[in-house]
Amino acid sequence: MLTLETLQAFIQAYAARLAELCTVLDDLDNRIGDGDHGTNMARGFRTAADRITGETFADLGALCQAVAMALLASVGGASGPLYATAFMRFAQSWKDCTNVDFGQVATGVANACEGLRARGKAEVGEKTLLDVWTPASEALAAQPDEYGMRAAVARATKAALASRDIPATKGRAAYLGERSVGTCDPGSISSAVFFEELADATVG
Ligand code: ADP
Ligand code: MG
Ligand code: MG
């Protein structure tokens, strides 16, 4: 289950994980992109976490909308509008709800995944964060409970590591094509951590 409190705690926890992983994610992006993925994500979610701290929100929709706006305002790279899109889809999915069950979390994640696909014009297998969101979303839809949430994390982690062997055909890494093989997609790694923290917040 996800409540106003656990969603706020999730944003704080994810921002803290991104701060820890900032250098690792920048290093990965340095190999196949422009070296800023960790910096972008850490800055974006720190801004979002700070913006929601001490604020009260009427429902999960308003909270997710505030996160989306903070990400849009603070991240210039591809990941800013992509994660903002995911949170706008969460906001639509959980409008007027102060808490949602795993079925509604699954619907929100599926809608977010669809939003990411539309926004990035990517398909699975192009070495983008969609490679992680898609199997995680499918696992949760297949079993919308705490076991499904844990299965989603397992699928997400596996996909993030498997991104190493895929040649990029979308995003900056596509300029390298086959030479992007051998490096994990930074956005896939940060997305796997997103699902880890979402599971910790919801399974509790
Ligand atoms: P930028 O590439 O603008 O510097 P970031 O480094 O913050 O932005 O984010 C890069 C990540 O964004 C990639 O690792 C990839 O997972 C994701 N990404 C890039 N382009 C797309 C796209 N078209 N669709 C989905 N995800 C994408
Ligand atoms: Mg980058
Ligand atoms: Mg950049």
Image (spheres, rainbow, N blue to C red):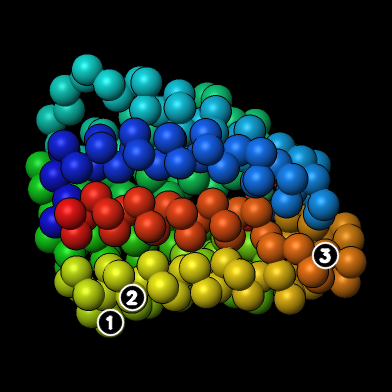
Tell which tag, 3 or 1, sits nearer the viewer: 3
Res 151 label: 2
| Residue carrying label 1 | 142
Graded by Cα atoms within 10 Å as few (under 14), some (14 to 19) or many (20 or more), the crowding at tag 1 reads few
Residue 36 relative to residue 101: left or right = right
Q: What is the x, y in percent for residue 197?
A: 35, 51
Task: Say whether disc 3 or disc 1 marks the residue closer to the N-terminus.
Answer: 1
Name the quadrant containing residue 48: top left
Of all residues, the one furthest to the bottom in this rendering is 142
* Residues tagged 3 and 2 counted as in contact (Cβ below 8 A): no
Q: What is the x, y in percent for residue 20?
A: 53, 38
- Residue situated in front as seen by the camera: 69 or 162: 162
Q: Is residue 145 above or below residue 120?
A: below
| Residue carrying label 3 | 180
Quadrant of the drawing holding the N terminus: bottom left
Q: Secondary structure at mark 2?
A: helix
Asked if the residue at label 3 sits under 8 Å from ligand 1, the reply is no
Q: Secondary structure at mark 3?
A: helix
- Residue situated in front as seen by the camera: 195 or 4: 195
The Cα atoms of the two marked residues, 3 and 2, are separated by: 28 Å
The Cα atoms of the two marked residues, 1 and 2, are separated by: 10 Å
What amino acid type is highlighted by mark number 1?
Ala
Q: What is the x, y in percent for residue 192?
A: 48, 60
Q: Secondary structure at mark 1?
A: helix
The Cα atoms of the two marked residues, 3 and 1, are separated by: 32 Å
Q: What is the x, y in percent for residue 148?
A: 26, 75
What amino acid type is highlighted by mark number 2?
Ala
Residue 171 relative to residue 10: left or right = right
